[in-house]
Image: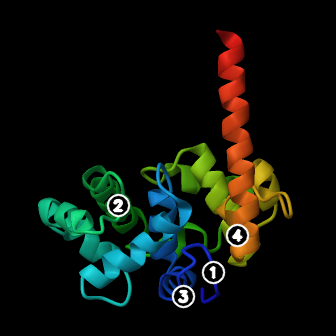
Amino acid sequence: MDVTLHLAQDPEADALLGRSPLAALVGMLLDQQIPMEWAFKGPATIAQRMGADDLDAHEIAAYDPEAFAALLSDKPAVHRYPGSMAQRIQQLCQYLVEHYDGDASAVWEGVGDGRELLKRLQELPGFGKQKAQIFLALLGKQLGVTPEGWREAAGDYGAPQSFRSVADITGPESLAKVREHKQQMKAAAKAAKAAKK
């Protein structure tokens, strides 16, 4: 895996995401309740604070939980909720160590089809169906992981040029389209909620 991603809109952070399967998974895990770029810059910030060029699942899994939470809480914080996200990242890494010998790419390498890959992603701590489908779409659209049926398994996120998620972000223009889609979805949800009252 060595591709150019544009999710963090930061060359160094994006370079790490493009070469490190674990960094990409951690970025996806962080992508909630904060701007996308902030989430996907997180793995590079964590690696830098650990004094490393990459993330290592074994090292993070074994890290002292309080020290790891402090590492994410340092200013600027890696996430709006650094303590709980530190715990989630460690749980993800512990799962990867236990089930995949710490190799994040083993989650998708050699997988039979899109449904199986979606199942594996949903088994990861912190990955519900929607997050798993978005990551599956990212794998298929930008990282060359295209088992049979991957688009179907990714649902609406797998559709070409759907601009629904990070899977479609390839630069500032597509980022703006994804943002616009998210704002439309929020507005629609808000309107539906108001109509129920």
Query: Badge 4 local density, few (<14 within 10 Å), some, or many (20+)?
Result: many
CA separation in Å, label 2 and label 3: 23 Å
Q: How many marks?
A: 4
The numbered dot on residue 89 is 2
Marks 4 and 2: which is nearer the front? 4
Q: Amino acid at mark 2?
A: Ile
Q: Are marks 2 and 3 in contact (CB under 8 Å)?
A: no
CA separation in Å, label 3 and label 1: 9 Å
Query: Badge 3 local density, few (<14 within 10 Å), some, or many (20+)?
Result: some
CA separation in Å, label 4 and label 3: 14 Å
Per the image, label 3 sits on a secondary structure element best described as helix
Q: If the image is split into quadrants, where does the N terminus sit? A: bottom right
Percent x, y for residue 97? 34, 68
The numbered dot on residue 11 is 3
Percent x, y for residue 59? 25, 76
Per the image, label 2 sits on a secondary structure element best described as helix
Q: Is residue 73 above or below residue 122?
A: below
Q: Amino acid at mark 1?
A: Leu
Q: Is residue 82 above or below residue 52?
A: above
Marks 2 and 3: which is nearer the front? 3
Q: Amino acid at mark 4?
A: Ile
Q: Earlier in the sequence, mark 4 or mark 3?
A: 3
CA separation in Å, label 2 and label 1: 21 Å
Q: Earlier in the sequence, mark 1 or mark 4?
A: 1
Q: Badge 1 is on which residue?
A: 5
The numbered dot on residue 169 is 4
Q: How is the image coloured?
A: rainbow
Q: Earlier in the sequence, mark 3 or mark 1?
A: 1
Query: Badge 2 local density, few (<14 within 10 Å), some, or many (20+)?
Result: many
Nearer to me, 71 or 95: 71
Q: Amino acid at mark 3?
A: Pro
Q: If the image is split into quadrants, where does the C terminus sit? A: top right
